[in-house]
Image (cartoon, rainbow, N blue to C red):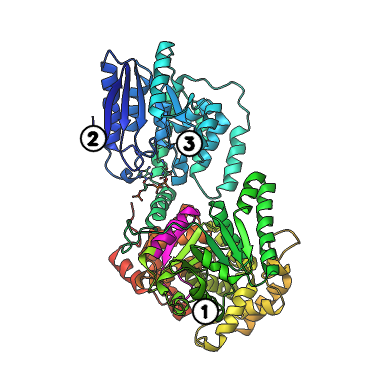
Amino acid sequence: MSDVVQFSKRGSIGIITIDSPPVNALGHAVRQGIADGIAAGTADDDVKAIVLHCAGRTFIAGADITEFGKPFKEPGLDAVMNAMEQSTKPVIAAIHGTALGGGLETAMACHYRCAVATAKCGQPEVNLGLVPGAGGTQRLPRLVGLEMGAEMNAGGAPISATVAKDHGLVDEIIEGDLLDGAVAYAERLVAEGAPLRRVRDIEYPKDIPADLFDNLRKKYAKIKRGFEAPQRNIDLVEASTKLPFDEGMKKEQEVFFECMMSVQSAAQRHLFFAERQASKIPDVPKDTPTKDIKSVMVLGAGTMGGGIAMNFANAGIPVKILDTTQELVDKGMSIVEKNYANTVKKGRLSQEKMDQRMGLISSTANFEDVGSVDMVIEAVFEEMDIKKDVFGKLDKFCRPDAIMATNTSTLDVDEIAAVTSRPEQVIGTHFFSPANVMRLLEIVRGAKTSKEVIATTFKVAKQIRKVGVLSGVCDGFIGNRMIHGYSREAVFLVEEGALPQQVDAALYNFGMAMGPLAMGDLAGLDVSWRIRKRQAATRDKNLRYSPIADKICEMDRYGQKTGGGWYDYKPGDRTPHPNAEVEKLILEESKSLGISRRDISDEEIIERTIYALVNEGAKILEEGIALRASDIDMIYISGYGFPIHRGGPMFYADCVGLENVYKRVCEFHEEHGAFWKPAPLLEQLAKEGKTFNKLG
Ligand code: T1G
């Protein structure tokens, strides 16, 4: 046995116990230990059946992703699973936590499966740009049916043990202690002379709907636009209906290795670790003391404030919304209620859950109530004077150990903290609109923010199911600072010859959730217009500036909220339609700026906008505003709709090759001026043949 897998016996039942923290992943030692345990149980005449179970938090949660791309060591998972499946004695999987990927595949190679009701089963390989590599597309559909099997493989979502039991994936739900229950279940199977039931022998029904797989392909082409793995999973489930089992397994292995070598899978594996790395702050150790946040107050009952409050109610944390008048508070509460009601109407939330969550949200117009909570999140108007006034009052009324967070999207957190007597308690928590939907939370560390407050805020981020990413203090922090160049280039490209719909289509086809100009219409063109007007006096007149967006605003066209911005919108429909007036304005502006419009390729549109992100990201990295390139990738994936299958702007640049990116940035610098001055870090890495992220 290996030091992570033990074999023991209880009466006539052999027990293989895997204990390989954190998630009992199927690394080499675990695979070897299982094989040894099966051999030991088979060789022991006293053993009549074998239970496979795990210590710790979960049953096997999959292959060991950290082993991918490294030299392979026998035994492979397929050999281990064959040993189990061919065993002359029944092997029973005892599942708790999450049986995922190779974990579920291992369980399906057993003859029987039992689980506690809280367990979950799934094939999430597709979320890593993969297909299962050990029978997930060949066994799962045989157990749960073709459509459910294909959906679970192509969609990657797990099912509960009770649903799994209803569909024949789990045979027995265990009440009480899992191992005790599993041993008793094994004894019962032996007493009943239960057959050595092998999933591979299950025959599919004859009447397979002819359009089943094509309909699934269409569905996933839409909901997972641009992703290859969902399609490959569907192809393999379909192949399982056409090929003998062993050939189907061979086909799956081939496709698994093809996916493993794909850029899309490398991108998604990069993001899997990037998300977990983001909460690791070098000078804030894992054992930094944290506070339990049991009550929160949100200042500002607007759209953002209401959305922020919903996150806490969704996590079961009581939250109070404060505004200056009862009327504003009541209005804010009705926005929250409407949001929840919409979700209930769409069938994504029960009325009971909505009532439960609404029960956790209260409201007040009495500022001094801030003294009753563990954490305050300010979400008032984005004006420094207003924020300073609020924090001056918070300093007066909040409890000494209360965390005072600001939801500012760009303003200087240190300047805000400086008006308080306790800057160590002040931190930035930048939510992204809609705050109850977008997963990103930029956590902005002030110069004096304490380590405990940082660690506590990251813990809160995880509690409210946000991706917390640390940022230093600068104008726009990480995400918004980078988006300026991206949006700027989009407008310059319109001035130079592209029309809005070409720019947006090129980026939509690249994989962005929506094009930059349509995104401006969604956010409201007047928001950035107000900022540009405020900055006009100090703007560097030597730098190219496009007046087009200002002129669109001067036509009272602010975007969707006014029925038109860059595009026109029909009432109740978010579909953008080109507007002749705007196109006329664009042509006139190009002319008045002396620009002779030219045909612009989609490739140039992608390079000018995405490399603008990359160049600014490189500056943010070398200034230490972002801890690591993968943090920047996480920000763009979870806050700005960057395509997951491209891994984020910095990972994408790594894949293009930094020498290629640097070459184009130099050409743009030559042609378009100072905005494109290459970041020194980009130049250095390009010349050294290195990458932003460690790859592989
Ligand atoms: N391999 C290696 N490490 C893993 C891992 C894995 N499969 N899963 C998690 N970890 C690490 C993770 O990096 C973190 O490390 C720690 O465990 C806790 O994870 C053959 C080929 C199981 C639901 O895709 O979904 O099987 O940061 O923070 O929120 O067909 O981890 O502490 O150092 O996420 O409680 C398929 C991936 C693999 C499951 C637990 N399996 N994992 O969530 O904790 S491919 C998956 C998860 C495969 C087969 C194919 C989650 C979780 P650290 P965590 P959590």
Q: CA distance from mark 1 to mark 2?
A: 58 Å
Cβ–Cβ under 8 Å for marks 1 and 2? no
Question: Where, by quadrant of the figure, is residue 215 drawn?
Answer: top right
The amino acid sitting under disc 2 is Asp
For mark 1, does the 10 Å Cα neighbourhood hold few (<14), some (14 to 19), or many (20 or more) residues?
some
Foreground tag (1 vs 3): 1
Vertical order, 128 against 492 (above or below):
above
Q: CA distance from mark 2 to mark 3?
A: 27 Å
Give the residue number, with chain letter if any, for mark 3: 120
The amino acid sitting under disc 1 is Lys
The residue tagged with tag 3: helix, strand or loop? strand
- Find residue 388 and name its label: 1
Of the numbered discs 2 and 3, the one sitting upstream in the chain is: 2
The residue tagged with tag 2: helix, strand or loop? loop
Q: Whole-percent x and y of residue 645?
A: 47, 52
For mark 2, does the 10 Å Cα neighbourhood hold few (<14), some (14 to 19), or many (20 or more) residues?
few
Can residue 167 be seen? no
Residue 247 magenta-drawn?
no
The amino acid sitting under disc 3 is Lys
Foreground tag (1 vs 2): 1
Using the image as rendered, state which of residue 609 and residue 330 is in the foreground: 330
Q: Quadrant of the N terminus?
A: top left
Magenta range is: 453-478
- Find residue 3 and name its label: 2
For mark 3, does the 10 Å Cα neighbourhood hold few (<14), some (14 to 19), or many (20 or more) residues?
many
Question: Where, by quadrant of the figure, is residue 33 drawn?
Answer: top left
Q: Whole-percent x and y of residue 23?
A: 36, 41
Vertical order, 543 against 656 (above or below):
below
Residue found at x 44% / y 11% = 192
